[in-house]
Amino acid sequence: MQPVLSIKNVAKSYGPIQALKGVSFDVPEGSVFGVLGPNGSGKTTLLGIVLDVLLANSGTFTWFDNMPHDVARRQIGSLLETPNFYHYLSAFNNLEITAAIRGKGVDDRDRVLKQVGLFERKDSKFQSFSLGMKQRLAIGAALLGGPKVLVLDEPTNGLDPAGIAEIRELIRTLNKEGITIIIASHLLDEIEKVCTHVAILKKGDLLLSGPVDEVLVSEDQVEVRAGDMVALQDALQTMSGVKRIRLNDNTLQLACDANTGTVQVNEFCISKGITLSHLLLRKKSLESKFIELTN
Ligand code: ATP
């Protein structure tokens, strides 16, 4: 399948600050693609470049298998910053103004309002909306004209928990309707909950990218101790399912493959004549993996 967006070696500096240092990845069609990284890692810069708002210093990107940018642009809806809606106008009339500014989608307002679940409230004033509804209207504005791809920068920033849940649900629904969605976020939780794919940035470098369930697998650790720690470590170094061993506070921490857990480690030690005095499975959270990656 052709990626909807292919980014190759994109670099961008602001004077001495290297915001992006040669970033490459593909966004598969039909994915919810998260660009994840702490503040200042280059997410907004990257979105600005692929939306033709900023110029890269080097590197290339192509939309829809080399479609000319101006044609591709019509297939892309984006929400980089919250649009200025008029508080005293209705949702419907606000979308009329947005459509006029963008020169597209004025006849598309009913469809879009249904798509974001605001059709019943189309004549209500913007000021009567909850935070989640306001953000749904902003996403609705980005959907005018029926784009195939939606690009969102930190779409749940500043929302209350109810609003966050609404927006995440909307993203899932839009994706089920066939829209590819690219989201920049500094929240691991957001990426984990709504994204199928992720690219992790740190200070302008791409650390890794791929399907969320491959890239963000949490790695469990088995902890062991025995009377003779040296013999224990020597023995475990020969065990096939053990990927890494770390000695920490007189305890060995074992990073194991998917088929190796406490039972296998215990059986192995018994077979080597070693009796364990401590055996524990420590679940490593994604949070700690993310912090380890980005720190
Ligand atoms: P945030 O979530 O805080 O917006 P981000 O991951 O989106 O972070 P960028 O906004 O792309 O990151 O910023 C990347 C780096 O480039 C940061 O060091 C930032 O200070 C710098 N930067 C961004 N825009 C400019 C600019 N217009 N002029 C100078 N430096 C900039």
Image: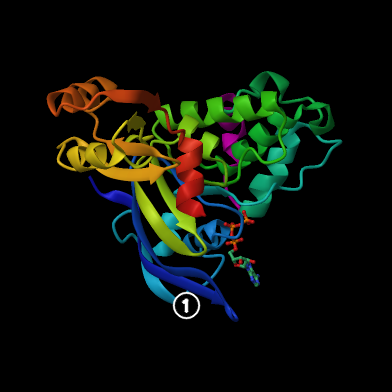
Quadrant location of ligand 1? Answer: bottom right
Choose between 207 and 9: the one closer to the eye. Answer: 207
Q: On the rendered structure, is 232 left or right of 290?
A: left
Crowd class of label 1 (few under 14; some 14 to 19; many from 20; radius 10 Å): some
Our reading of the magenta stretch's main secondary structure is helix
In the rendered image of this protein, does residue 12 appear above or below residue 51?
below
Is 265 part of what is drawn in magenta?
A: no
In the rendered image of this protein, does residue 118 appear above or below residue 53?
above
Q: Which residues are magenta?
A: 103-115
Is 108 part of what is drawn in magenta?
A: yes
Which residue in the protein does label 1 denote?
A: 57
Q: Is residue 291 at all visible to an observer of this figure?
A: yes
Which residue is at 72% across, 29% downward? 160
Which residue is at 82% across, 35% downward? 89
Q: On the rendered structure, is 68 left or right of 162?
A: left
Find residue 81 and report its horizontal and vertical position in percent: 67, 51
Choose between 175 and 7: the one closer to the eye. Answer: 7
Residue located farthest toward the bottom when viewing the structure as drawn = 15
Q: Quadrant of residue 283?
A: top left
Q: Is residue 150 at all visible to an observer of this figure?
A: no
Find residue 265 and report its horizontal and vertical position in percent: 23, 27
Q: Quadrant of the N terminus?
A: top left
- Label 1 element class: loop
Which residue is at 19% across, 35% downward? 241
Which kind of residue does numbered mark 1 sit on?
Asn
Which residue is at 47% across, 56% downward? 201
Q: On the rendered structure, is 70 left or right of 96?
A: left
Q: On the rendered structure, is 160 left or right of 68?
A: right
Question: Is the C-beta of the residue carrying label 1 under 8 Å from the nearest atom of ligand 1?
Answer: no
Find residue 219 and report its horizontal and vertical position in percent: 35, 35
Choose between 247 and 100: the one closer to the eye. Answer: 247
